[in-house]
Image (spheres, grey):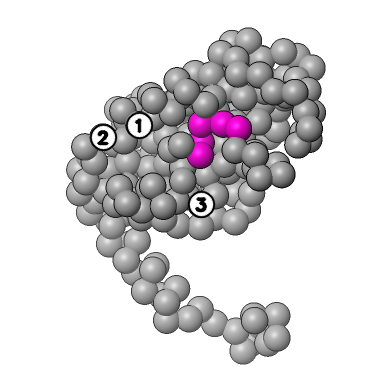
């Protein structure tokens, strides 16, 4: 709809204004504990938000393809996984800030990998330390991370989650564990506030 009007005749609607005001109040004085779940394919579109959140939250959970940039920043072999090499230092900075601010920072401990990004490809579930050099990570693992993250999601007052949380949905196949922690209906039922960062 915005494309139908020139820049001088565009503007944010009342609903967007209401959402911005609501989230501003939530972030200004959040109830504790405050948990954020952030995912999708890239760190770049969420970098500013991550730097803000790390100063506010008690726990930060990273899911989806963007987890591989953080894993590489920790020194893991991530093969041909989608990684933003220019943001490795930024990822390290975010993890340093988490430690400094005593924020519990969660990354996957096992992942879904494949030789290529295709709906007919062969997939494996491996520990994060075992990603082959010529394979690529598609998402967090299906069992252990999901269980770990579910434990982390217990007993929160405010929960904030991005949508989409995953990036691996090829041909309708839900391979990884992000779906089990990141299903929007599940998070909404838990009381999470869902926001959209569509840069992925």
The CA span between labels 1 and 3 is 18 Å
The reply to whether discs 1 and 2 touch (Cβ–Cβ < 8 Å) is yes
The reply to whether discs 1 and 3 touch (Cβ–Cβ < 8 Å) is no
Label 3 Cα crowd, 10 Å radius (few <14 / some 14-19 / many 20+): some
Secondary structure found at label 3 = strand
Task: List x then y, in percent, for residue 108.
Answer: 49, 24
For residue 14: magenta?
no
Q: Quadrant of residue 65?
A: top right
Question: Residue 27: which numbered mark, if any?
Answer: none
Task: List x then y, in percent, for residue 121.
Answer: 77, 28
Secondary structure found at label 1 = helix
Residue located 38% across and 42% down the image: 36
Residue under label 2: 154
Q: Nearer the viewer, mark 1 or mark 3?
A: 1
Secondary structure found at label 2 = loop
Left or right placement of residue 176 versus residue 192 in this view: right
Residue under label 1: 150
Task: List x then y, in percent, for residue 154.
Answer: 26, 34
Q: Is residue 66 visible?
A: no
Residue located 60% across and 56% down the image: 198
Left or right placement of residue 140 versus residue 170 in this view: left
Left or right placement of residue 77 versus residue 100 in this view: right
Left or right placement of residue 145 versus residue 78 in this view: left
Q: Magenta span: helix, strand or loop, mainly?
A: loop
Residue located 60% across and 38% down the image: 174
Residue under label 3: 163
Q: Quadrant of residue 23?
A: bottom left
Q: Which residues are magenta?
A: 175-179
Q: Nearer the viewer, residue 81 or 113?
A: 113
Question: Compared to 98, does 186 lie above or below?
Answer: below
């Amino acid at each position: 709809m915005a494309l139908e009007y020139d820049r001088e005749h565009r503007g944010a609607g009342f609903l967007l204004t209401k959402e911005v005001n609501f989230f501003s109040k939530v972030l200004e004085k959040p109830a504790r504990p405050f948990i954020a779940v952030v995912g999708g394919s890239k760190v770049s579109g969420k970098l500013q938000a991550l730097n803000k959140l790390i100063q506010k939250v008690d726990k930060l959970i990273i899911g989806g393809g963007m987890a591989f940039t953080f894993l590489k920043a920790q020194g893991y072999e991530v093969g041909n996984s989608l990684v933003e090499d220019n943001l490795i230092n930024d990822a390290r900075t975010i993890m340093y800030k988490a430690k400094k601010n005593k924020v519990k920072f969660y990354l996957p401990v096992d992942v879904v990998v494949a030789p290529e990004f295709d709906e007919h490809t062969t997939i494996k579930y491996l520990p994060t330390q075992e990603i082959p050099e010529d394979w690529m990570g598609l998402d967090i693992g299906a069992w252990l991370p999901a269980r770990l993250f579910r434990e982390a999601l217990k007993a929160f007052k405010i929960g904030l989650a991005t949508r989409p949380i995953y990036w691996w949905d090829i041909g309708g196949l839900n391979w990884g564990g992000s779906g089990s922690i990141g299903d929007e209906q599940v998070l909404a039922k838990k009381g999470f506030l869902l926001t959209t960062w569509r840069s992925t």
